[in-house]
Image (cartoon, rainbow, N blue to C red):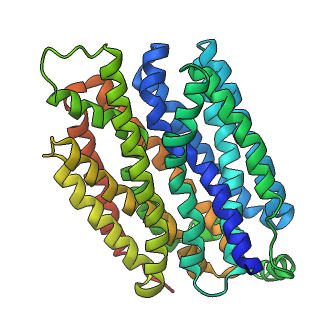
Amino acid sequence: MSRKWFIAAVGTFIHLLLGTVYAWSFFQGPITDFSGWSNTQVAWAFSISILMLGLTSAWAGNKMTAYGPRKLAIVGGLLYGLGYLISGYALAHHQLFLLYLGFGFLGGIGLGLAYVTPVATVSAWFTEKQGLATGMVVMGFGFGALVMSKFMAPLFLQMSDNNLSGTFYMIGAVMLVLIPLFATFLKMPVGVETATVEKADNYKPLHKYILSKPFIIVWLVFMSSIVAGMIFISFQSPLLQDLMMAKMPTDTNFSDPQVIATLAAAGGTLIAISSVFNGAGRFVWGAVSDKIGRMRSFRIILALQAVVFGLLIFVTNPIIFSVLVCVVLLSYGGGFGVLPSLAKDMFGDSMMASIYGALLTAWGAGGIVGPQIVAFMKDNYAADAGLYAFIAGGIILITGLALSFAYKQK
């Protein structure tokens, strides 16, 4: 294996571990039931995490030259693991603020530090097939929910006798060890750091770029796709279980442990399967964008999601619902596969890490809007929560699609 493909493999494994955050909907219901907190209160832990991920990615992308990818990724892995440990303590002692601090604030900062560095590093190693290489790395992030929902979480729940706190402690320990270990292998190609610094001296300040029309349009387009995906990443398991319960006989005892286990297993299976589509979308759409162009790929992604959201308004069958969720996450993941190459196309090699990091703030914004739309609907309009959430998501997608036609590549 050549050095650049080894770096790409390391980056993919780091993203695989970081992507376990996408299995949040696996824990959303159990934490709500265990703690007595509302859906909105619990969902804020995930929203804060994604918000901090986006904000920290912007900072980390701009500091790659100063600190290097290895240091940033190691610190990120340690903070992400620490976030799980604090969250375990928060669940054990019913401290909502500590859940926000651990999983949300510290864990999100760790995600941001460790997320952007493998992508920017791999981008520097590959002068050709940008979409393919970076798509492969971010594909790992999409597969993270599969690893968590079907392997790590069930195993640790069994080992801890279904104790949520103990499960979070074990997950945290794994992250503390493995992410820093993989991060030690991250390294920029020889001469890239120096060349980047020399070229960057000839560029205007970063805020001049992020206030430009092309940047703002891409940010809004990307954010539209994020909101759509986050609606399901945060609540796909509860939404599926709602449809399944509606199909069950009216005399079903929903407090029966067997019924609860059946519903939870179905939710976990959907998380696992949809994560495969999320991961594959990053790789596939990254490669497709090499052929048909970056913004054209984004337009197809948004249009496909908008059609699916329109169909979801009328769907009551759990299987059809699951299929459509997979299509949404295939498209959602595709946005992450296209974005790194689009950032590089927009402003060149020397600004790629900074611009890419700044664009990821849209991820943070979407991470608040998407989950909170569903959480609000479930807390206030439980019977029609999915319907209202799908209408809201569809409107946002159509708006993003319309904005994409205002983009002009200089």
Residue at horizontal 73%, vertical 70%? 7
Residue 303 place in picture, x, y as percent: 27, 66
User: What quarter of the picture does the N terminus occupy?
Assistant: bottom right
Is any atom of residue 213 visible in this view? no
Q: Quadrant of residue 192?
A: bottom right
Residue at horizontal 49%, vertical 37%? 24
Residue 102 place in picture, x, y as percent: 66, 30
Q: Is residue 335 left or right of residue 10?
A: left
Q: Quadrant of residue 331?
A: bottom left
Q: Is residue 189 left or right of residue 354?
A: right
Q: Is residue 52 above or below residue 341?
A: above
Q: Is residue 208 above or below residue 276?
A: below
Q: Of residues 172 and 54, which is closer to you in this image?
A: 172
Q: Is residue 162 left or right of residue 404?
A: right
Residue at horizontal 78%, vertical 43%? 177
Residue at horizontal 61%, vertical 35%? 104
